[in-house]
Image (cartoon, rainbow, N blue to C red):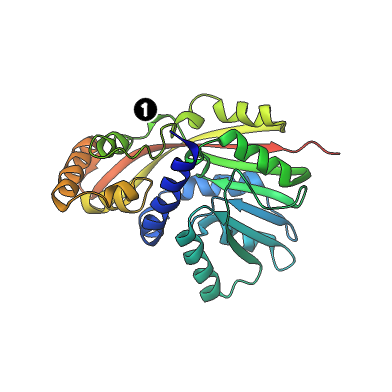
Amino acid sequence: MESQLQKRVQRYGWDKAALYYETFWQQQLKPAQDLLLQMASISEGEKVLDVACGTGLVSFRAAEQAGKTGSVLGTDISDRMIEVAKKIAEEKMVSNITFERMDAEQLQLADDSFDVVICALGLMYVPDPSGAINEMLRVLKPGGAMVAAVWGERDHCGWAEIFEIVDKRVSSEVCPMFFQLGTGNRLDLHLMKAGFDHIESERIVTSLEYTSGDEACGAAFEGGPVALAYYKFTDDVKQEARKEYISSIDAYKKSTGYSVPGEFVVTKGVKRPG
């Protein structure tokens, strides 16, 4: 898929998903976010960049760790995600955090300007993940760490059929390489190729808990990566797609809802000093 077209799909798709994202994904993504922040080991006074920050779920936690003498800049390709994040920052009166709309492959930031760079579940959506990783390396200070989390192997993510269900109804091409970075040691190799040292990875298995089929569908269609395509559907097609998706996760149904398996890969690299 042509790079600029995919970026437009991502930009406007996440604009659609912004209002639903935290409702449907905050708890489900927490295990990956917890591990990412643990590996990032942000210290008081550090300057942090959160690439593909969304509504700031990780950004605000990073700001707490950086403290009053530190700062966090969150960037995202979606205007609406940035608007929501800014509003939350104002409501919470968080003074050491800012948000800007920015392309992960073209960070409008100075070289060697951040102590830590994080990217929580955003690299899968970037047309050129290697380009984004190179940009993160460029803006990182020598000796600084970059930590990225991605979804794991397709066969270990029970919700994966959502992409086929949508694509056979409308050509979305939302993220054709979605699971590639979480396959094997692919993300490690990207960091190695970029020039990072001391690369380490952890793979964690988790489950996405939903209290009902409607909640599971809300996460899959309204608060996630296929939101733009979903909004193109007629009401009849929406119901048909939702029914098919519920059928695809039927094996994970339990008395209190659904427990859908998922897997995350979190990888850390350090920029060579000097």
Q: Residue beneath label 1, please?
A: 155
x and y percent of residue 4 in the render?
49, 42
Within-10-Å neighbours for mark 1: few <14, some 14–19, many 20+: few
Name the amino acid, label 1: Asp
Quadrant for residue 202, please give it. Answer: top right
* Direction from residue 84 to residue 157 in the image, left or right: left
x and y percent of residue 164 in the render?
28, 33
* Direction from residue 257 to residue 270 in the image, left or right: right
- Of 268 and 163, the residue lying toward us: 163
- The quarter in which the C terminus is drawn is top right
Q: Is residue 186 depicted above or below 56 in this figure?
A: above
Quadrant for residue 44, please give it. Answer: bottom right
- Of 22 and 255, the residue lying toward us: 22
* Direction from residue 25 to residue 143 in the image, left or right: right
Q: Is residue 27 in sight in this rendering?
A: no
Measuring 48% from the left and 46% from the top, which residue is drawn there? 31
x and y percent of residue 22 in the render?
41, 58
Q: Is residue 11 in sight in this rendering?
A: yes
Report the residue that reaches farthest toward the top: 184
Report the residue that reaches farthest toward the right: 274
x and y percent of residue 190 in the render?
61, 29
* Direction from residue 6 to residue 41 in the image, left or right: right
Measuring 66% from the left and 48% from the top, which residue is drawn there? 117
